[in-house]
Image: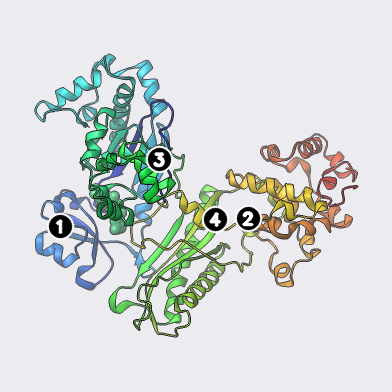
Amino acid sequence: MPIPRPDLQGDRVIAHVDMDCFYVQVEQRKQPKLRGLPTAVVQYNDWKGGALIAVSYEARRFGVKRSMRGAEAEMVCPNIQLVQVPVSRGKADLNAYRSAGSEVVSILSTKGRCERASIDEVYLDLTDAAESMLLETPPEALEDIDEEALKSHVLGLSGDENRENNVQRWFIRSDAIHQDKLLACGAIIVAHLRGEVLKETEFTCSAGIAHNKMLAKLASGMHKPAQQTIVPSSAVKDLLASLPVKKMKQLGGKLGSSLQNDLGVNTVGDLLKFSEEKLQERYGFNTGTWLWNIARGISGDEVKGRVLPKSHGCGKTFPGPRALKTTAAVESWLSQLCEELSERIQLDMDQNKRVAHTLTLHARAFKTSDVEPHKKFPSKSCPLRYGINKIQEDAKKLFDTGLREFLGSHSNAWRVTSLAISAGKILDTPRTFSISRFFQGKSFSSAISDASNDDIQDDAPSSSIGCKENIVPESDKDEEVFAHGKSIKEDDAPSKDRKIDVLCTHSRKQKDKGNGSILKFFSCTNTSTKHASNAPSSWSESHEGQDQRDHQEECLVDGHSRLGKISNQQRDDSWNFNAEDIDPSVIDELPQEIQREVRGWICSSKRAKTTKRGSSIFHYFSTDDNA
Ligand code: DCP
């Protein structure tokens, strides 16, 4: 469901940059002889020459479209050059496109906050850079305005004749409102960035520059390839008046159809006829307000500082006669997908120190009989455990659970037409990395590899399992979809355990901020502690080295009593370390009293070894209030 957000305070400059026929450009850089020729990238498949997934602008002039198959494209454009997507493990290997996207991101992210929105598009918040430029070198003070900037399309600016002169005048208007002056600066910055991208990567891209993300995204696709479009606020009303609802992000599906069929709304501007109350009445409070906002070009979505993917996913479709019929066939494909996923999350951890927390399986299937023809295969997720075998094992369990639910009481034969798995809820490795190693005497990556899981959850229905890399789920809601944390009501916690509960709550808050907390290590990582617990045997047998997130859940669910059972001996063992080794940066996360104590240890490691129970960190973790 769309979330309405009022426009952000103050004038902003947001750019949406989208690569032109991206996969084609990547292939043309590999094979420069293809440059300038009608070219398309084809998904590996020997049926009718495979499916086109990217089409060069030269080929588009012949009428070649992405919806075509290779054979059809050759009919409309006999000279078309068809390049196959690289293949690995029997499926498309998108690594080359991913890294090419990262090259671009590293250039674009130099001028402001950058959000990587998909494999080939980013949002930039250029407000600060534009404000500085306006103060230091405003366009009217420039001798020459960047040629590329002068080629910009400024919506609402009349006349195709003398376009460049008109644009130049628009750039240097001294009576322009502050917001337009900022947009002019933003456009100059974007033109420069696009030039850098071309120089460094040989790729062209197109951009939209506006005062919010929604308008910038609409504008970037208006003039392609290798061009940019500016949306002054005075042009917003006309832009939306003629914009078909289905072109608007989030209106492509049922909501857009309902607007058309039930309210007769064909363009976004048509929504202006309806009051906010009326729209809320029809579509609910949030969606109603969101619709009212977008009709006016209002959208306060912030550009999130994120240059890395929000999730990793890989999938494979099995159309027509290729549909999978047996569990063995599904398992075999799942194993391959899991191998790829495992490699990618491991690389992400090694390169970016990030850990994925949720494994999700999506599938499309049908039953061979006619019963429940519209029933969808439910998406399922569970906590993610690192290591190929574990991911494979869990993915199979997710599939089995989904299949059982899909079949229900009918024991029909089934077919699977697509499978995809993804790793989501990716968080930075907590800054407790060094200290965790030091408490556990093992590496973080091995520490998170041995979890067990038995909590499979429903996931949101899979929207599409196409081959376009979905770096970022479409909406913030996906974050909730991936959420799987268990909760405990504080009021239910026995009072003597309350202290620990506070710790766990604190720990959860830290996680929510994207920072892990040292507290969960204090509370959960000691294996002797686990074995001293009342946990069910399956739990305690399998949790050695469990990942931090699972520790956290452990805390939230039943960690209270566990912590209270640490023997003095165990305590002594667990705190037998060299205090100088603590990474000082992690200490700020500790509660004040512990910070004081740990800092004390660092000043004098001797003191740490002689810390008395009752005035120390042990006291903090004791469930005995009198301790
Ligand atoms: N892609 C894909 N499958 C799809 C859509 C896209 O594999 N169904 C891949 C190939 C594209 C890349 O994602 O090159 C980016 O998709 P875009 O929708 O941005 O399209 P292009 O970049 O190819 O073209 P355009 O210049 O129109 O943006």
Q: CA distance from mark 2 to mark 1?
A: 48 Å
Q: Is residue 25 visible?
A: no
**Left or right: 597 as drawn, with respect to 414:** right
- Crowdedness near tag 3: few (<14), some (14–19) or many (≥20) residues, C-alpha within 10 Å: few
- Crowdedness near tag 4: few (<14), some (14–19) or many (≥20) residues, C-alpha within 10 Å: some
Amino acid type for the residue under numbered disc 1:
Val
Q: Secondary structure at mark 1?
A: loop
Report the residue marked by disc 2.
549
At 32% from the left and 17% from the top, the residue drawn is 138
Dot label at residue 279: none
Dot label at residue 106: 3
Closer to us: mark 1 or mark 4? 4
Q: Quadrant of residue 484?
A: bottom right
Instruction: List x then y, in percent, for residue 195.
Output: 28, 34
Mark 3 and mark 2 in contact (Cβ < 8 Å)? no
Pointer 4 or 3: first along the chain:
3
- Note whether 361 is above or below 301 in the view shown: below
- Choose between 436 and 366: the one closer to the eye: 366
Instruction: List x then y, in percent, for residue 496.
Output: 83, 52
Amino acid type for the residue under numbered disc 4:
Ala
- Choose between 232 and 574: the one closer to the eye: 232
Closer to us: mark 3 or mark 1? 1
- Note whether 427 is above or below 180 in the view shown: below
- Choose between 176 and 172: the one closer to the eye: 176
Dot label at residue 483: 4
Report the residue marked by disc 1.
64
Query: How many dots with numbers?
Result: 4
